[in-house]
Image (tube, rainbow, N blue to C red):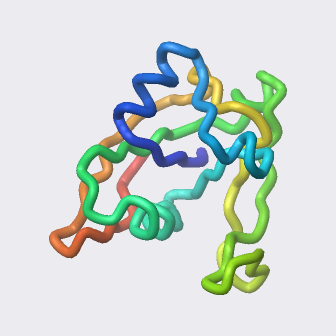
Amino acid sequence: MILHLCTRDELAAAREDGARRPPSLDEVGFVHCSDPGTVHLPASRLYAGRTDVVVLVVDPDRLAAHGVPVRWEPGVGSQGGEDPRGPWFPHAYGPLVLDAVVAVHDLVPEPDGTFRPPAVT
């Protein structure tokens, strides 16, 4: 399973549309995702302190069945640009079809506003 972060409002909009199409899909051609061990990194960087964040648990095989390939690629380093020495992240090259979302979990920040890896299934 791979994970995708969004807000509850973004999930509600995706439910109306049948798929999650974040701006990155138009900007860079893919949807940013994570695995359970790394999802806290972008969560803390992008959503620090927010209480409206959810984790979508996505089945990559279901995405593939909808013609959406998933590729593991280097993440962005602290200086910008890819960092092949850092963690690699799954990128979905198409919209996250909600049929591929097998679970949704709230992501609750720590008292300092950061996030820890969630227990997701």
Q: Residue at x 79, y 24 (%)?
A: 65
Relative to 95, say whether 92 is above or below. below
Residue 110, percent across and down?
22, 67
Q: Residue at x 64, y 52 (%)?
A: 32
- In the image, is 47 to the left or to the right of 34? left
Residue 21, percent across and down?
63, 32
Q: Nearer the viewer, residue 81 or 109?
A: 81
Relative to 33, say whether 21 is above or below. above
Q: Nearer the viewer, residue 9 or 64?
A: 9
Q: How many numbered circles are shown?
A: 0
Residue 62, percent across and down?
70, 27
Relative to 77, say whether 55 is above or below. above
- In the image, is 36 to the left or to the right of 65? left
The image quadrant where one finds the C terminus is top left
Rendered image quadrant of residue 96: top right
The image quadrant where one finds the N terminus is top right
Q: Nearer the viewer, residue 2 or 74?
A: 74
Rendered image quadrant of residue 81: bottom right
Residue 25, percent across and down?
71, 41
Which residue ends up furthest to the left in the rendered image? 111
- In the image, is 22 to the left or to the right of 90? left
